[in-house]
Image (cartoon, rainbow, N blue to C red):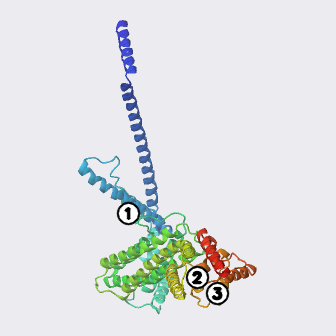
Amino acid sequence: MEETSREAVATAVQRVAGMLQRSDQLDKVEQYRRREARKKASVEARLKVQELSDELAKQLWMVLQRAIVTVRRDPTMLVSVVRIIEREEKIDRRMVDRKKQTGFIPPGRPKRWKDKMFQVLEGTVGTRIEGTQSVTREADKIEEMMGHAELYSECDINQLEPLLPQDVVDELLSKYVQTFTSDPGYRTGAPDPLVDPACLQSNITGWLRKALETDKKDWQKETEPEADQDGYYQTTLPAIVFQMFEQNLQVAAQIDGEFKEQVLKLCLKQMNTFLVRYREEAMTYKEEHLRDRQLPQCYIQYMIAIINNCQTFKESINSLKRKYSQASEPTDSDAAIERTLSDVAKEGCQFLLDEVFLDLEEMTSEALRRVVVEYIKAVMQKRITFKNADERREGAERMIKEAEQFKFLFRKLAAGEDTDRLCGAIAAIAEVFKLTDPTLLFLEVTTLVSKYPDIREEHIQALLAVRGDASREMRQMIIGTLSENKVSYSGLTQPIFKDITVPTMTMTTMNTMTSMATAKLLK
């Protein structure tokens, strides 16, 4: 036995030594170890996901068990629960379809949360009914009969003597009959006040107002709105509104077909009034945002949700009409609702465009300034000189025309209030070129300097050089006078000539021209 153990140990040692000498075997061992570690991590992660799913289910069933109270206090929570269950049902159907193709289905699927939801709701309703039935019909004592008024006709009035004397009963019955028959509002065949149209209209108006107020609070949240299955932003407002309409129409359908039509017309009428208010609130939301564009943080996302809600409203209205209305002809309310929804969607899109243009306005203003600066720079850097008055006039008219084109373009782009001043710089330079009487040149240049104080001497020299007919004495006089009466630059307006540099070549050309003119005068 000991010899066998020694041989086994020796064999094991020999194999391990062989593995240590072969790096490929060590790599296989390491790969196997990593594979097992990944499998273990995957299993642990799946177990955590399953635990989260179970915890979510517990929370859902807890909310559904309190559905009777929650539907009045916080209907939004109940809507969220139903949506989660609907989403899981869709995933269940998709997994079942995939199983038919591949034969594989993830563990825990299908969850069948929808069936469980109905079971919980049924149990909740049953518990509520059992809890309110405090007195049974099989009670032996006649005093307990008062818990069931429908048993009154089966009992002899003499049996009520332990509770009430005979004279008191007669007096109560007499007063009841007298009060009931003397009510001026009572008419045989009159509708029950519970389904009175005026009362119903008041209730619908109140419900719609509360739903809109709740939705408005969501607009101020710092989190993005919910998205539907296609990823489009939306709020819970359409679902809440049409769930309320659906409940009222279901009750009306059980009463009478004609009354159902009346309730549907009333709902559509109130819907039009509600959408007008919805439009006003969206506009107020936009105006509040413009006061401080940093708030609310998710303004763009909720404005998109408001626009998307219009399509949901339209589809839900058509669905209600198909389900509860026999008439196929459109009504006045239909046209008004469609028009209001279209206005809300168009205005919402315009609000989003305004937001974009507000961001671009500053860049557009800078773009106009750069265009004007580059244009004037190109004029001053050209190595040309007008030879006569006709050339100066043609060049000036072309500059004025192009300045008007710039003004027209950037006004459409909302470049700001500086559009006229920036484009006016090109027109002012054109007037310097266009002037036919050289003796008035000083006045024209003075006007240019007063409008644009940031212009420098080299700019004026370059413009006079391009004009071509200013004598040396006139240039010196203009430059000297302007230097003595220099206009201070306030810095309140956007500078134009600060970024315009006159090339050395232009100054050299001017000096050459001045030297030639001086030489001619000396001769």
Above/below status of 214 relative to 394 = above
Q: Identify residue type, mark 3.
A: Leu
Q: Closer to the camera, 151 or 396?
A: 396
**Do the CB atoms of the residues marked 3 and 2 lie less than 8 Å apart?**
yes
Where's residue 58, x and y in %?
A: 44, 53
Quarter where residue 22 is shown: top left
| Cα–Cα gap, marks 1 and 3 | 73 Å
Which mark lies nearer to you, 1 or 2?
Answer: 2
Identify residue for label 2: 467
Q: Which residue is mark 3?
A: 441
Q: Residue at x 45, y 81 (%)?
A: 275
447, above or below 26, in the image:
below
Q: Residues within 10 Å of mark 3 (few under 14, many from 20)?
A: many
Task: State the image coordinates of residue 267 (x, y, percent, origin top left).
Answer: 40, 81
Please state which amino acid type lies under the numbered disc 1. Gln
Q: Secondary structure at mark 1?
A: loop
Instruction: Provide residue 286's location: percent of width, then percent of height.
Output: 53, 76
Q: Nearer the viewer, residue 511 or 439?
A: 511
Instruction: Residue 335: tell me if it is visible.
Output: yes
Q: Which mark is residue 144?
A: none
- Earlier along the polypeptide chain: callout 1 or callout 2? 1
Q: Which residue is farthest right? A: 484
Name the image quarter holding residue 330: bottom left
Seen in the picture, residue 467 relative to 233 is either above or below; the reply is below
Q: CA distance from mark 3 to mark 2?
A: 10 Å
Q: Earlier in the sequence, mark 1 or mark 3?
A: 1
Disc 3, SS: helix
Report the residue at 34% width, 80% height from top: 255
Residue indicated by mark 1: 229
Query: Which dot, 1 or 3, sits closer to the camera?
Result: 3
Task: Mark yes or no: residue 163 visible.
Answer: no
